[in-house]
Image (cartoon, helix red, strand yellow):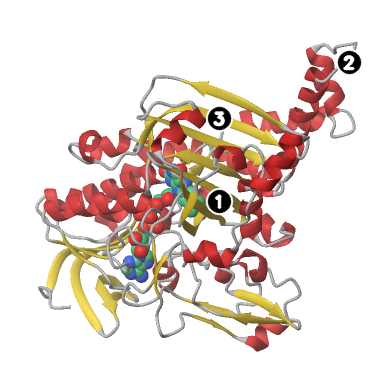
Amino acid sequence: MAQQAATKQRIKRIRLEDALNANVWDVDTKPHIIVDSEKCAGCADKACTYLCPGGCFTLLAGKVLYSYEGCLECGTCRVVCPKGAVTWNYPLSGRGVQYRFG
Amino acid sequence: MGLPAKFDVAVVGAGPAGASAAYTLARKGFKVVVLERGRAPGSKNLFGGRVYSRPLERIFEGFRNEAPIERWVKREILSFMTEDGMVSVEYTSNGSTSFTAYLSKLSAWMASKAESAGAVIVTDVRVDDVLMENGRAVGIVSGGDRLYADVVVIAEGVNRLLCEKMNIVTPLSPEDVALGVKHVIRLGTDKINERFGLDSDEGLAWFLVGKATDYMPGGAFLYTNSATVSLGIVVFLSHAVREVKRHVYDVLEDLRASLPFVRLLEGGSLVEYGAHLTPEAGLRMVPRKLYGDGFLIAGDAAGLLINLGYTVRGVDMAAFSGYLAAEAVEEAHSLGGYTSQNLSCYERKLNDSFIMKEMKRHSMVQKLMVKGHVFELYPHVLVGAAKRLFEFEETSPKLLEAVNDSLKGRCSRLRVLLDVVTLMRGP
Ligand SMILES: Cc1cc2nc3c(=O)[nH]c(=O)nc-3n(C[C@H](O)[C@H](O)[C@H](O)COP(=O)(O)OP(=O)(O)OC[C@H]3O[C@@H](n4cnc5c(N)ncnc54)[C@H](O)[C@@H]3O)c2cc1C
C-alpha cells in the first residue's frame, strides 16, 4: 500500500499545452486549416475534437472552434471529418512544427 | 527559386523514399532536384522508432558506419494489457537486423548523402501541383513558380495530397490510415541502461496491445534511443472515429502515467510531442498504378507499409521503393523516354522485390487486425489465463484448464479457430 501511494504521488500529468510547448515552433501568420462551419454543424460525432492530437478543435456550446497554432501537421482532421468541412494543407515556407527528433 | 530551368528528375519529398530515390539517381549521373516543404530535411518527419537495416544497407554505401543509429535492437517485448495485468512475451538475442532511430535525423542523413552524391535539395518549398502537359507530368508547381523535369518521383508521404489532386487516388478515408502520437522523453543513457537492462549499444523494442489504446485496434510502442525513450500509441482511425471516448492525447498520457511506465520513465523530461498518420490498409491503399506518363510514386504515398501487430515496416519499404523508382527511371531512360509504358518496369521491380512479396504475404494479418475484437479479446483471454495460472490459493489449475477457463464466457473456441485460420490462409 505504501508503495502504491508513493507511486501515485510520483505521477505528474503533463497537460497537452505543456507537451506542445516542448516542441520547437515557427507558426505561420496565415491559417492552413479552415473549417466550413455550416457543414460542420451537421455532424453529430465531432471526432476531430477527440482525435486532433494538437487539440486544435474544441467544442464550445455545441460548436467547433478551431485554431491552427498547435497543429502537428498529421492530417487527421481532414480524414476523420465526415462532412468534408475541413480544408487543410501543409503550411508554406517550412512554417509550423519543427521536429528535432521525430 | 533561382535554379537551373530544367532537371532530369524532380523528387517531391525528402523523406526516406524521396532521399533514397535522389541518392540513387544522383549516383547514376542524373541531374536531380529534391523539393521538401520542411525548413530542413527531417523537420517534418515522425515515426515510431525502429528500422530494419538490410534494405538501407543495400541502398546507401557506408550505412552501418555513418547512419545516425541510436541502438541495435537486442530485446523485444510484446505485451497484452488489460486493467487486471499484463502478459508479455520477451525475446532477447545478439542479432543486429534492426536499430532504433529518430526519423528526423535519419531523413536528414539520407538527404545529406543525396546531396553529396550531387542532388540539389531545395527546402521550404511546398509543391502545390505536379505540372501536367498533354497528360504527362513535366515538372512541379510551387506558388507561382514552375520547375521542369523529364520525370517526377512523388514521395510526398501518407497524406498524398498531390496524388489526390492528380486523381490517381481517392481522398484518404478513416479505413486507410492510423494516427500515431508520440512522446520523446529524455532519461539519460545510464538510467535507460539500468531500468531496461541494456548495455549502451543495446536497444529495446516494446509493443503493447489492449488497454494501452483503450482496446482500439493499433497498439502502443516504446523504443529506447541512446539517451531518450520514444513512447507512443497508434490507433486505426476506422475504429477510433467511432470508439474513441476521450482525447487521444489523454490515452497516451494515461499510458505514460500508468504502471510500469511511470516507474520506468520516472525523472524523465518530455523533449518532444508529435503526431503523424501511417498507412494501415495494406494492399487496399496501394494505387492501381504506381506510375504514369512522366511520374512514379514511392513510399507511404504508394501505401507501401506493413504493420504486423508486433512490428512496423515503413522506412525500409519506403527507402527501397525509392531505390527501385530510381532504377526504373534509369531503365526507362535507356529505353528512350519516360512514357508510362517504359516506366512500367517499376511495377515489375516492386513485384520482384521483398516489398510486394511482403505486402501480399502479410495481407491476412492486416485483415485480421481491422476486425476490432482481436485487440479486446486476446489481451483479456491471456491476462485471464495468467491470473488463473499464477494466482491460486490451494488448487493450482493445469495449463490448459487455465486457458479454457479464461476463454469461457469471453468467446467460443470456434472464434479463436476462425482467427487462426484467417492468419494461416495465404493471400
Ligand atoms: C506513429 C508512426 C510509427 C511508425 N513506426 C515505424 C517504425 O517503427 N518503423 C518503420 O520502419 N516505420 C514506421 N513508421 C512508418 C514510416 O514512418 C513511414 O513508412 C516512412 O516515413 C515513409 O517514408 P516516406 O518517405 O514515404 O514518407 P515521409 O517520411 O512522410 O516523407 C515525406 C516527405 O515529403 C515531404 N512533403 C510532403 N508533401 C510535400 C509537398 N507537397 N511539397 C514538398 N514536400 C512535401 C514531407 O515534408 C516529408 O519530408 C511509422 C509511422 C508512424 C506515423
* Residue behind label 2 places its C-beta within 8 angstroms of ligand 1: no
All told, the count of numbered labels is 3
| Element type where label 2 sits in the image | loop
Q: Position of residue A94 (x, y in %)?
A: 33, 72
Residue designated by label 1: B281
Q: Where is residue B308 in the image (x, y as percent from the top left)?
A: 54, 37
Q: Which of the two labelled residues, at mark 3 and mark 2, occupies the earlier sequence position?
A: 3
Q: Is there any visible trace of residue B299 in the rendered image?
A: no
Q: Which of the two labelled residues, at mark 3 and mark 1, occupies the earlier sequence position?
A: 3
Residue designated by label 2: B393
Q: What residue type is labelled 2?
A: Glu
Q: What residue type is labelled 3?
A: Ile
The CA distance from mark 2 to mark 1 is 46 Å
Q: Which of the two labelled residues, at mark 2 and mark 1, occupies the earlier sequence position?
A: 1
The CA distance from mark 3 to mark 1 is 25 Å
Which corner quadrant of the image does residue B336 belong to? bottom left
